[in-house]
């Protein structure tokens, strides 16, 4: 039953490329996004498909290193590499690229990407002090709306944005519901399966298809849990993965954790639970979007208390036995923040913690395996 | 119950056999290019009820011999406690890696850090440098100890440090003084890891490099902490694995 749904997911994923092409042939648009901070509602409001372009594969990195320094976050190199080598259909489909000044590396990379395709950069505040920075962020968001209007030739009304917020709220509800099935002991879904579903549905032209399949899988999983069925045992160590985003291709650590006899039950990152918010449907839409999106607790924000709060909630809710904190090489914000996360997890919550720093390549798989196995011996 | 532990490292393989908590026998050999063949040869006529493998070659051994495995972190922690029950910290410097392990009062591993991506600060570094300077590994420490002055090497990388050493020798610099500087750089890296992972308490120093008395001396000076050496420090991983094999 679960496997049938995964087959269905794959079918929709393959059909999706045709759906996007058809959508564009009908005179509509696609807009590429890199970061969770940019409100994708503004694309949806103009009937444009928002496409997540964040690179999760090693292959394009060689092309990127012809221009970018080797000593740079693999996510940035992968993202740029896809663009530079024209090997990502979603980048190709994108009529406009939306970027954010999240970190140093991304900021400068987008300057170079702009030479490949026009990039609209949002100036993201570095702090979540709403009194000081909400207003400038609202200006950025409003400007993005204008840019999308220019691109699509459509006028985006307040109602259009409200409708988009409602749709994406439903999508986020479905994502959260799916992630929450893993709260069961044992989880009916593996960390790799969850990653695959969240990753693939992110590209869907038709969000209703994504919402539907996520709900179907959640239904199946809840039924499995009622019957005490699971790929894991009750004693299988439950791991929460925090830190940088992961996706299909950059899932090495998730694979190793699950090969070593544990299960990843939760993702405290922007690929996972950081998406599980709701945008206020009553307030002025631009204001509501700006406030909610600015609150996302990524390490680019300083300080980043929101991440500690989220971990504090997730760890008991998911009955977590150990925390693995993943940092991509050269990601300074998550790397420095790891120290605070370590203290919080080990001292406040008394749970074993492991910090891993790696890149997308498979060359250090065995070194990671030793560390993860030793960590699981601690759990 | 006779339990054996085998530590299949990247440079050497050690095996320890324990009965009733006492070490009955220890053996070692070079890993060479065929670790499993070497490991099998090492244990060929050894008798034991159960064997546990650790080290970089543990998974190969697990498949070949149908044995269980444990990581070298857990094995070194257990071995250290066998020799020194009050240990809070283990520093292991092996042939190609180094690690620091912090233990809680009950002897459980609570934190660790490994350097297994860079030869600097490992046995390999000392091996290469000894050769470049014309010393044997066993006389390297004494040579370093004998120098009155210390010549520091600036390169962090083993390969570049070797080049630097060659240049210094060509300039007529004193090999013993260079040796002293090289020993200091190994200690410096170890101390840096110790301070990050486990800044206080007595340190059990295991692994082949702990046989170098001058390294031990410099480490004691640099950390100002008790540094305890097990009887055969390179056996520590195997001893720990043997104890764990006996469920001890």
Image (cartoon, rainbow, N blue to C red):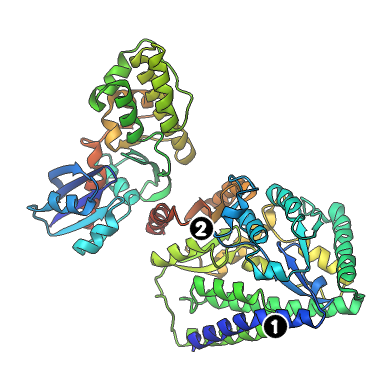
Residue A49: percent from the left, percent from the top?
A: 75, 75
Q: What residue is at 39 percent from the left and 75 percent from the top? A: A233
Q: Residue at x 43, y 23 (%)?
A: B164
**Number of the label disc, if any, that sits on residue B242:** none
Marks 1 and 2, the one that precedes in the sequence: 1
Which chain is indicated by disc 2? Answer: A
In the image, A171 versus A71, the foreground residue is A71
Note whether A175 is above or below A113 in the view shown: below
Evaluate whether residue A222 shows in this view. no
A291 sits left or right of A228 in the view? right
Badge 1, how many Cα within 10 Å: few under 14, some, many 20+? Answer: some
Dot label at residue A324: 2
Vertical placement of residue A327 versus B205, above or below:
below
Residue A230 image point, x, y percent: 44, 80
Residue in the picture at 21% in, 51% down:
B6
| CB-based contact (under 8 Å), mark 1 and mark 2 | no
- Residue B97, visible in the rendered structure: yes
Q: Is residue B129 left or right of residue A99?
A: left
Q: CA distance from mark 1 to mark 2?
A: 38 Å
Discs 1/2, front: 1
Quadrant the N terminus of chain B occupies:
bottom left
Mark 1 sits on what residue? A19
Residue B20 higher or lower than A167, as above or below: above
Q: Quadrant of residue B130?
A: top left
Helix, strand or loop at disc 2? strand
Q: Residues within 10 Å of mark 2 (few under 14, many from 20)?
A: many
Answer yes or no: are tags 1 and 2 on the same subunit: yes
Q: Position of residue A331 (x, y in %)?
A: 61, 49
Q: Nearer the viewer, residue A111 or A47?
A: A111
Chain of the residue under the numbered disc 1 shown in the image:
A
């Amino acid at each position: 039953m679960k496997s049938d749904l995964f087959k269905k997911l794959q079918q929709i994923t393959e059909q999706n490329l045709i759906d996007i092409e058809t959508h564009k042939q009908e005179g509509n648009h696609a807009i590429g996004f890199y970061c969770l901070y940019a409100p994708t509602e503004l694309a949806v409001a103009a009937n444009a498909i928002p496409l997540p372009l964040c690179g999760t594969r090693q292959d394009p990195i060689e092309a990127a290193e012809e221009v970018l320094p080797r000593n740079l976050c693999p996510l940035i190199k992968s993202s740029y590499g896809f663009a530079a080598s024209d090997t990502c259909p979603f980048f190709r489909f994108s009529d406009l690229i939306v970027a954010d000044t999240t970190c140093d590396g991304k900021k400068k990379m987008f300057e170079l990407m702009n030479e490949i395709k026009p990039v609209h950069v949002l100036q993201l505040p570095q702090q979540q002090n709403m009194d000081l920075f909400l207003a400038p962020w609202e200006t950025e968001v409003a400007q993005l709306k204008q840019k999308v209007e220019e691109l699509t030739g459509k006028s985006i009304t307040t109602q259009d944005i409200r409708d988009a917020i409602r749709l994406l709220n439903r999508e986020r509800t479905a994502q959260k519901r799916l992630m929450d099935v893993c709260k069961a002991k044992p989880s009916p879904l593996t960390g790799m399966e969850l990653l695959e579903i969240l990753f693939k549905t992110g590209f869907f032209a038709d969000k209703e298809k994504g919402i539907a399949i996520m709900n179907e899988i959640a239904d199946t999983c809840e039924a499995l849990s009622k019957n005490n069925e699971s790929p894991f045992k009750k004693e299988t160590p439950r791991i929460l993965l925090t830190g940088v985003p992961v996706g299909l291709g950059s899932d090495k650590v998730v694979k190793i954790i699950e090969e070593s006899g544990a299960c990843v039950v939760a993702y405290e990152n922007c690929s996972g639970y950081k998406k599980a918010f709701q945008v206020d449907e009553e307030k002025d839409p631009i204001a509501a979007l700006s406030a909610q999106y600015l609150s996302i607790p990524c390490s680019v924000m300083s300080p980043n208390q929101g991440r500690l709060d989220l971990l504090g909630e997730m760890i008991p809710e998911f009955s977590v036995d150990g925390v693995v904190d993943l940092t991509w090489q050269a990601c300074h914000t998550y790397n420095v923040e790891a120290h605070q996360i370590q203290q919080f997890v080990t001292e406040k919550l008394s749970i074993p913690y492991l910090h891993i720093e790696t890149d997308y390549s498979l060359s250090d798989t065995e070194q990671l395996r030793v560390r993860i196995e030793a960590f699981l011996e601690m759990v | 119950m006779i339990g054996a532990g085998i530590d299949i490292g990247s440079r050497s393989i050690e095996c320890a056999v324990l009965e009733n908590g006492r070490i009955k026998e220890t053996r070692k050999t070079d890993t060479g290019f065929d670790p499993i063949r070497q490991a099998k040869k090492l244990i060929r006529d050894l008798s034991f009820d159960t064997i546990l493998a650790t080290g970089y070659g543990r998974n190969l051994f697990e498949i070949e011999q149908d044995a269980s495995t444990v990581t070298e972190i857990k094995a070194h922690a257990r071995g250290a406690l066998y020799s020194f029950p009050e240990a809070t910290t283990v520093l292991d410097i092996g042939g190609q890696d180094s690690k620091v392990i912090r233990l809680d009062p009950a002897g459980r591993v609570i934190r660790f850090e490994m350097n297994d991506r860079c030869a600097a600060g490992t046995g390999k570094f000392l091996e290469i440098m000894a050769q470049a300077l014309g010393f044997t590994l066993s006389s390297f420490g004494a040579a370093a100890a004998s120098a009155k002055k210390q010549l520091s090497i600036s390169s962090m990388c083993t390969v570049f440090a070797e080049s630097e050493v060659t240049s210094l020798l060509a300039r007529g610099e004193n090999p013993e003084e260079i040796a002293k500087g090289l020993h200091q750089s190994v200690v410096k890296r170890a101390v840096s890891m110790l301070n990050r992972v486990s800044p206080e308490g007595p340190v059990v120093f295991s692994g082949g490099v702990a046989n170098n008395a001058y390294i031990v001396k410099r480490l004691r000076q640099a950390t100002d902490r008790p540094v305890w050496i097990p009887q055969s420090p390179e056996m520590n991983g195997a001893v720990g694995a043997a104890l764990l094999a006996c469920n001890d």
